[in-house]
Amino acid sequence: MENNTFGLYANKIEAFLGKSSKEFTKEDIIRVVREMDIKMVNFMYPGGDGRLKTLNFMLNTPDYLETILTCGERVDGSSLFSFIQAASSDLYVMPRFSTAFIDPFEEIPTLCMLCSFFNRDGEPLASSPEHTLKKAMDAFTKVTGMEFHAMGELEYYVIRPDEEVFPAVDQKGYHESAPYAKGNDFRTRCMQAIAECGGKIKYGHSEVGNFVENGDCYEQTEIEFLPVPANECAEQILLAKWIIRNMGYQEGLNITFAPKITVGKAGSGMHVHMRIMKDGRNLMLDGNKLSENARKAIAGMMKLAESITAFGNKNPTSYFRLVPHQEAPTNVCWGMSNRSVLVRVPLGWTSGKDMCHEANPIEPLTKRDYSEKQTVEMRSPDGSADIYQLLAGLCVACRHGFELPDALEVADKTFADGDIHDPENAQRFAALTQLPDSCAASADRLEQQRAVYEQHSVFSPAMIDGIITQLRAFDDRTLRKDISGNDEAVAKLVEKYFHCG
């Protein structure tokens, strides 16, 4: 009987080779080039601005292909990262075969691979984004005996000329269908392209934000991914942003992942869900309750929440989204299914009820284990984030929770079981720590807490220094207050950072 398992895979190379991408070898890549008539290979890697960079190779001979796959290539590190000096800037980039995908945009048949950075001694570059996350994951496993998994929610606006037919209701776009949502077809094309490049997508939908301004229609949308090891999560977010922007460019649409794009309208976040795994089991639940492991991880995030903004909120407009009395968080607390808190524990199918049978009575009653679905969600990050730094920082924070002797007490003290914006709860929540209100304040918090991130040699001192310098260079310590109520000044700021991350 024919095995059609890989025929179901959206990833074109997995389907072609009949194996998981984790098993791709150099010989597999050579076979793909030969049998899929590939003419060009692209090496891709994140720079210090968080965006993908590309190096093109025209394939001349089989020997040349084997050489670049085995040896990689040299690049100028000082042009990619601010913390690398020009006097010693040469780096190697080496392709990771498991990341191979067919470029969906090039007319010339092109195979792309993400790369890792190595220094002149052939060692992984200590301050590279990908290696920093790997070190964070290794330290998490060493301390806890568990694995750190994550998934991202990618929110963004699609901008097109306005159409007067079937107008959408301002700021009421959540899960809207066509024809009131005009961008659903664009989103599904993006989702297909992301999946064909290896992204593991959970779902997509239109989001709250929609409005018309200066003859243009702004529609907010979201693509959410499935939980995977954190390094794979970073790769998926990085590639998804690249694909969405390219597809928008090809179709004449403007795209922005900016955290705030105009006054009084919904900003875009990039929430991150996390879970901790061991031997293929999700350890976030104990029966139908949140586990001690999960509460320790949350406690670590509560302790480091203020400095996590240094990785997840990277330009001044981030802090125009993180303002009081909005859905975006400002207080360091956590809660169950509560969207006003910093860390949310979403519904986790813990009722024990068979809702499938209830909705479809002809289906037999079942006793399914839903524990794999439980996550916790960090709600402060946005699209300006360096996704590798952010996931590494969250991984460090969750590990730190297991190192805190009073972790469960910290979790209890920061638990919010009511609306933190309700005046009746004002006194109760007045003592909560507040998130930073500027890049400069985030830099201060990172400097105060840097020792935790540098433990186990996860974040290099040079990398932390570079992030602090980058954030302070915005000189925005009082900016939010200075231009409050000045819509023109806010608009200029938004325009400056419109294509962040």
Image (tube, helix red, strand yellow):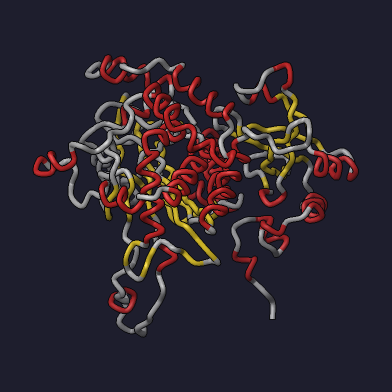
Q: Nearer the viewer, residue 173 or 402?
A: 402
Residue drawn at x 66%, y 61% as measured from the top left = 20
Quadrant where the N terminus sits is: bottom right
In the rendered image, residue 45, in percent from the top left (x then y), is placed at 65, 36
Residue drawn at x 42%, y 28% as measured from the top left = 448
Q: Quadrant of residue 461?
A: top right
User: Compared with residue 486, is residue 302 higher up or lower down, i.e. above or below?
Assistant: below
Residue drawn at x 69%, y 25% as measured from the top left = 77
370 relative to 244 in the view: left or right: left
User: Compared with residue 43, is residue 227 higher up or lower down, i.e. above or below?
Assistant: below
Q: Nearer the viewer, residue 187 or 137?
A: 137
Q: Nearer the viewer, residue 491 or 120?
A: 120
29 relative to 101 in the view: left or right: right
Residue 205 visible? no
Q: Residue furthest front?
A: 405
User: Compared with residue 102, is residue 146 higher up or lower down, i.e. above or below?
Assistant: below
In the rendered image, residue 364, in percent from the top left (x then y), is placed at 36, 85
135 relative to 416 in the view: left or right: right
In the rendered image, residue 11, in percent from the top left (x then y), is placed at 62, 56
Q: Quadrant of residue 28?
A: bottom right
Q: Quadrant of residue 363?
A: bottom left
